[in-house]
Amino acid sequence: MGPGVVFRRASRPDWAQLQAIELASFNGDRLSPRSLRRWIDAPTGDFYVAVLAGQVVGYGLIIFRRGSRSGRLYSIALAPAGRGQGLGRGLLQVLQQCAKRRGCKDVRLEVAQSNAPAQALYQRCGYRLIGHRAGYYENGDDACLMCCSLGAPAPAVQIGY
């Protein structure tokens, strides 16, 4: 990650940029504009953005269920201008820190079996394959279920508030 990257909580003024990132990142199974707005303020999730040169170029959302010691990485996406700069890894680290603060022991996620770049990122960040879900996605693609233990301290990432 280069200098000038800031990770901070998503806020309502980010909404239009979040929608644009969602549209540029996913062909299906998108978060609706209403869902994006709702997750910004939801107490059951932590929604962070990556800001580069004053522009929101990525986001990550992790959600939590009462009584569970696992966080669920719900979505992570980068605008084309934010790709290839380590921002996905940075967002992932921020969300893992959020999960640790909430007392989680691990983070779980689903990723399309056809999304090899995302799977590679998760594996480099300590996630391991724990299962599959056939036909999980809107387009019929299978999902790979992955998990990362939070037992070891996550690398520190500067978070702006």
Image (tube, rainbow, N blue to C red):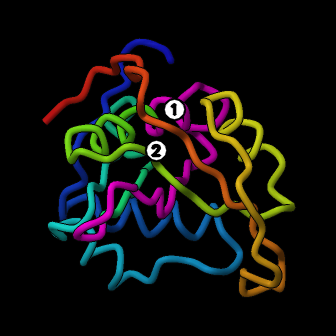
Of the residues shown, which amino acid type is indicated by label 2? Val
* Residue drawn 19% across the image and 30% down it: 160
Query: Can you identify the residue that label 1 sits on?
Result: 87
* Mark 1, secondary structure of its residue: helix
**Which comes sooner in the sequence, label 2 or label 1?**
2
**Pointers 2 and 1 in contact (C-beta within 8 Å):** yes
Q: Nearer the viewer, residue 143 or 157?
A: 143
- Residue 26 located left or right of residue 150: right
Quadrant location, the C terminus? top left
Number of marks in the rendered image = 2
Q: Is residue 123 above or below residue 103?
A: above
* Mark 2, secondary structure of its residue: strand
Q: Which residues are magenta?
A: 65-92
Q: Position of residue 133 (x, y in %)?
A: 75, 75
- The crowding category of the residue bearing disc 2, from other C-alpha atoms within 10 Å (few below 14, some 14 to 19, many at least 20), is many
Q: Is residue 93 above or below residue 23?
A: above
Query: Where, by quadrant of the figure, is residue 53 drawn?
Result: top left
Query: Can you identify the residue that label 2 sits on?
Result: 57
Membership of 69 in magenta stretch: yes
